[in-house]
Amino acid sequence: MTSTRRNFIRTASVLAAGSVLPLEALSKTGMNVAPSDKVRVALIGGNSMGWSDLNSFLKNKDVECIALCDVDRNVLNRRTDDIVKLGRPRPKLYVDYRKVLENKDIDAVIVGTPDHWHCLILCDALEAGKHVYVEKPIGNSILEINIMQRAVKKRGKLVQVGQWQRSQPHFVDAVRYLRSGKLGRIRACKSWSFVDWKGAVPKVPDTPTPEGVDYNMWLGPAPMRQFNKNRFHQSWRWFWEYAGGVMTDWGVHLIDYILYGMDRAVPTSVMAIGGKYAFPDDAMVTPDTMTAVYDFKDFTMTWEHSIGIGLGNWKRPHGMAYTGENGTLVLDRNGWEVFPEKQKIEAVPLQKNVGNGLDLHVRNFLDCVKNNTPQKLNADINIGRNVALVAQMGNIAYRTGEKVFWNNDKQVFSTKTANALITPVYNNGWSLPKY
């Protein structure tokens, strides 16, 4: 065994044990790596989290970015310059992701596109024999996420979902405490996101498509419409055709840890209320204020979000809380602590965050790819599918105005109006993958 391979394995074992490597150690993990021992990646979708993901990949010397794909050539040019500034070679550039997948030199693709593209790209990448790191939520509808889960099972490639808190040590420590039983029987859980950094999206008229943008390719399976900047970079998240608002953005991260901590996957019912209460006349379609209540039979989970307000539960803008008979554990990205119920247990002071969860999550994916250990992925397709389902259930309850009951065996709701939102309508000649 080479010393380089020993370093890789040693890194993987340290991360699996829940320890945190400093960033310098992560970046030196693959120094002097042989070309045959590198993971060659392509980024599809170069803005926002796609670019953040690639940055984390490039902190590892055993990673080489050989291709970039985006429908906006302005993004391609900007990101190419960014990669060169990092001291990395210029990648090949693509506008059509299908051309990327024809490149036999690519081992893995990073999917950082808007949500409505995730299903198609992931399924096509698997069929092309690529491993995939896909941003959350894995899909933009219940049928899509089920198709994606089946595709991974059939193709046998490794898929990591970008729920990076699964690799964050203090989150794992909080769940370890939760499962110790010290809180007693858990009857109520909360998750929330109050985003004061986000304001209104002023309405603007449609315009010609900016130069360098293939807008038809950006729309893909979404309904055809004229270009509007509110539905393009960054702002697409607030329109049902492309995403699910705050619920599938922050909610997928935070609800995931309720499911993880409580060792559950699917509720029996959900009801939701809310609306555009903060900015009733702006361009957003998804609700700026929303509360959803899920019934898991022996405990409830509440999701809350509000745009334009930053003071959430326990004075935290985002977080999760598990309330038991002996106390409440509160957890967010800064740390976790325990508040006792009438001194039944000892308080636990704030246990602060240590380490970069995204970097650790990417390293976990790379190690699993290199060692062919899908069972060691921290956020595999099943984890991504389960929380995406719960988030979609909340949005569907909101959109129908109904309390909806879920039949997990048949994968259907209790009402026709809710079931009508399970299957997306693909447009412009695109079709749902057949799995």
Image (spheres, rainbow, N blue to C red):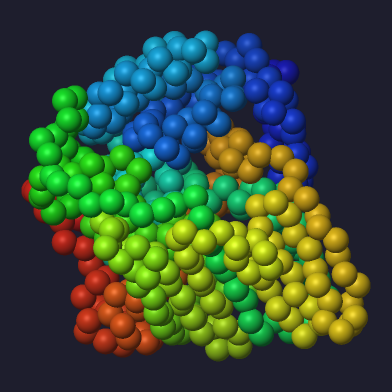
Q: Is residue 139 above or below residue 54?
A: below
Give left or right: position of 271 versus 115: right
State the image coordinates of residue 268 (x, y, percent, origin top left): 46, 84
Whether residue 71 sits left or right of residue 23 in the image: it is: left
Residue 149: image location, x then y, percent: 39, 58
Height in image: 6 above or below 133? above
Tell me where residue 266 appears, x and y as whole percent.
48, 75
Q: Is residue 280 above or below residue 88?
A: below
On the question of residue 261 being in view, the answer is no
Q: Residue at x 61, y 51 (%)?
A: 165
The quarter of the picture where the N terminus appears is top right
Q: Observer-nearest residue: 356 or 181?
A: 356
Image-quadrant location for residue 3: top right
Q: Where in the figure is residue 189, as x and y percent of width and height? A: 62, 76
Vertical side of 108 occupied by 403: above or below: below
Going 69% across and 68% down the picture, which residue do you hit?
A: 314
Which quadrant, please, contains the C terminus?
Answer: bottom left
